[in-house]
């Protein structure tokens, strides 16, 4: 009877020894002498390797020579207690099958200590490093935790369109989707591209947000959330920007700004707690190798109730701080990362939620306050990275929303469907957006957002 494969993660925690097992994986290291070899094998299920002990006299010498770093093998053997330090069990090999070799002279990961920049150039192989194995296991755990959180709280997962005819942000920096001939597109009488002859009969783009569509779902299902890819055509080559990234956007009917803040705080603390409880080994590795304060910072978020202040209060704190900032502080300007980090790390020493921003620097759909100067916006600020969540209570009043759209020259004919929800059974409602990669950046302590997404899409880069 053929042995059923076991995952290394399960074997390393097993108390049942002196039994026959099968493991499959990739060789991390091989050491030993002419009589015995010790192979560290990893299959991606854990950051830890299992040691394979090979009595060389029992195997074909040519096969043993081909077992080098990067090679893939299958091993049948006996799981035994280990006499070596740092491991509870090991496998005494009885049979070895070599699946794929890795030439030591050309395998890019033969040596340790590669830079992040180099590993981005070999994104097809970087998953095999300890670092990226840890990052992407954590990424999976966070995706699962997000769905579990919302499912357990009566939210419905809504799939919003990736191809859209609207611009949720009004920024205009979008990727166009077209089936027209790029060299000789049809033209109208004004000499412009005639999108009426395009596939959808109008100009369409890749979405920058699922929020507007999620609002439609919330007006019937009460609580919904989206979790999908979004796209920004910004020519930004920074450690914080991607052209393609994932967003989590809950929308809740009958929620005001305070309900929105309660949910955002509970959601973030749940996710960070989940990571601490379920990704301990990977977090410990990243804490040791990359960011000595990582676990302490994660606990800081879980253990502190978030401070709640208005934008005006934030401006007062910053102007009275005595700090010299690169960007000047004045009422009406947006908060920069240095301002946000000061509020969190130096002044309040806890995560901070800022509300009631000036209307002129926020999106058209945010609910207007009675002062006619501010809107019920919400930003959640974290240590090290600044803003991690942006949201608001939405404007549910038809006339106010329409007037605001007209003031910003947002075409009513393109957004009639959004306005109609304010005509038929409108309700107070709120929501926010959490950039998934920014969350993973915080949870892993990585320095560059390109290192927390499997295949980063940035200007001049779509290699893999």
Image (cartoon, helix red, strand yellow):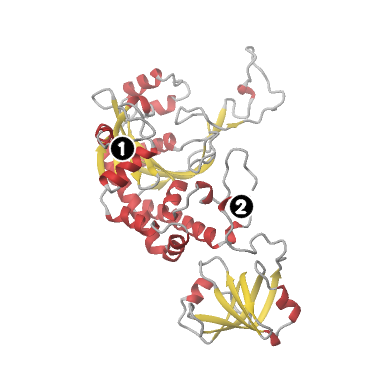
Circle 2: is it few (<14), some (14-19), or many (20+) Cα within 10 Å?
few
Q: Position of residue 114 (x, y in %)?
A: 59, 57
Can you tell which quarter of the image residue 54 is in?
bottom right
Q: Is residue 10 left or right of residue 68?
A: left
Asked if the residues shown at circle 2 and circle 1 are in contact, with their CB atoms under 8 angstroms apart, the answer is no
Circle 1: is it few (<14), some (14-19), or many (20+) Cα within 10 Å?
few
Of 323 and 32, the residue lying toward us: 323
Q: Position of residue 326 (x, y in %)?
A: 39, 34
Q: Position of residue 338 (x, y in %)?
A: 37, 39
Residue drawn at x 52%, y 59% as measured from the top left: 131
Between the C-alphas of marks 2 and 1, the distance is 38 Å
Which residue is tagged 2? 118
Q: Is residue 44 left or right of residue 419?
A: right
Residue 350 shows in this picture: yes
Residue 222 shows in this picture: no
First reached walking from the N terminus: tag 2 or tag 1: 2
Quarter of the image where the N terminus is located? bottom right
Of 409 and 445, the residue lying toward us: 445
Can you tell which quarter of the image residue 184 is in?
top right
Identify the disc placed on residue 276. none
Q: Position of residue 104 (x, y in %)?
A: 70, 66
Of 228 and 23, the residue lying toward us: 23
Secondary structure category for the residue under label 1: loop
Q: Residue furthest top?
A: 189
Residue drawn at x 30%, y 50% as measured from the top left: 266
Q: Residue furthest right?
A: 62
Residue drawn at x 72%, y 65% as measured from the top left: 103
Which residue is tagged 1? 323
């Amino acid at each position: 009877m053929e042995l059923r494969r076991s995952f290394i993660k399960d074997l390393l925690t097993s108390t049942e020894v002196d039994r026959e097992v099968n493991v499959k994986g990739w060789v991390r290291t091989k050491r030993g002498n002419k009589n015995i070899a010790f192979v560290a094998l990893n299959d991606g299920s854990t950051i830890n390797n299992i040691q394979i002990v090979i009595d060389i006299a029992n195997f074909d010498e040519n096969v043993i020579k081909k077992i080098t770093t990067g090679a893939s093998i299958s091993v049948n053997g006996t799981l035994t207690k280990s006499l070596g330090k740092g491991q509870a069990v090991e496998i005494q090999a009885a049979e070895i099958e070599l699946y794929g070799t890795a030439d030591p002279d050309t395998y890019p990961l033969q040596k340790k200590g590669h830079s992040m920049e180099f590993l981005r150039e070999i994104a097809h192989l970087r998953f095999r490093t300890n670092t990226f194995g840890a990052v992407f296991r954590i990424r999976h755990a966070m995706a699962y935790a997000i769905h579990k959180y919302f499912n357990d709280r009566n939210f419905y997962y809504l799939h919003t369109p990736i191809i859209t005819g609207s611009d949720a942000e009004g920024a205009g920096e979008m990727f166009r989707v077209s089936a027209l001939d790029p060299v000789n597109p049809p033209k109208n009488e004004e000499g412009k591209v005639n999108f009426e002859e395009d596939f959808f009969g109008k100009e369409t783009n890749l979405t920058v947000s699922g929020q507007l569509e999620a609002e439609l779902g919330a007006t019937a299902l009460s609580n919904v959330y989206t979790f999908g890819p979004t796209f920004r055509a910004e020519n930004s080559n920074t450690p914080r920007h991607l052209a393609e990234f994932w967003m989590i956007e809950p929308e809740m009917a009958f929620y005001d700004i305070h309900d929105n803040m309660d949910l955002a705080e509970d959601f973030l603390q749940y996710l960070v707690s989940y990571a601490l409880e379920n990704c301990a080994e990977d977090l410990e590795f990243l804490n040791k190798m990359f960011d000595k304060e990582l676990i302490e910072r994660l606990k800081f978020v879980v253990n502190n109730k978030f401070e709640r202040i208005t934008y005006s209060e934030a401006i007062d704190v910053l102007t009275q701080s005595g700090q010299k900032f690169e960007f000047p502080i004045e009422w009406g300007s947006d908060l920069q990362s240095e301002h946000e980090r000061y509020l969190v790390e130096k002044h309040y020493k806890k995560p901070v939620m800022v509300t009631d921003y000036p209307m002129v620097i926020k999106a058209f759909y945010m609910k207007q306050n009675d002062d006619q100067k501010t809107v019920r916006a919400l930003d959640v600020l974290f240590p090290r990275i600044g803003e991690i969540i942006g949201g608001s209570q939405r404007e549910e009043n038809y006339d106010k929303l329409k007037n605001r759209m007209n003031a910003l020259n947002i075409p009513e004919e393109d957004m009639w469907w959004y306005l109609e929800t304010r005509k038929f059974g409108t309700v107070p409602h709120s929501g926010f957006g959490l950039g998934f990669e920014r969350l993973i950046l915080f949870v892993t302590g990585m320095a560059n957002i390109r290192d927390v997404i499997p295949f980063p899409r940035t200007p001049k880069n779509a290699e893999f």
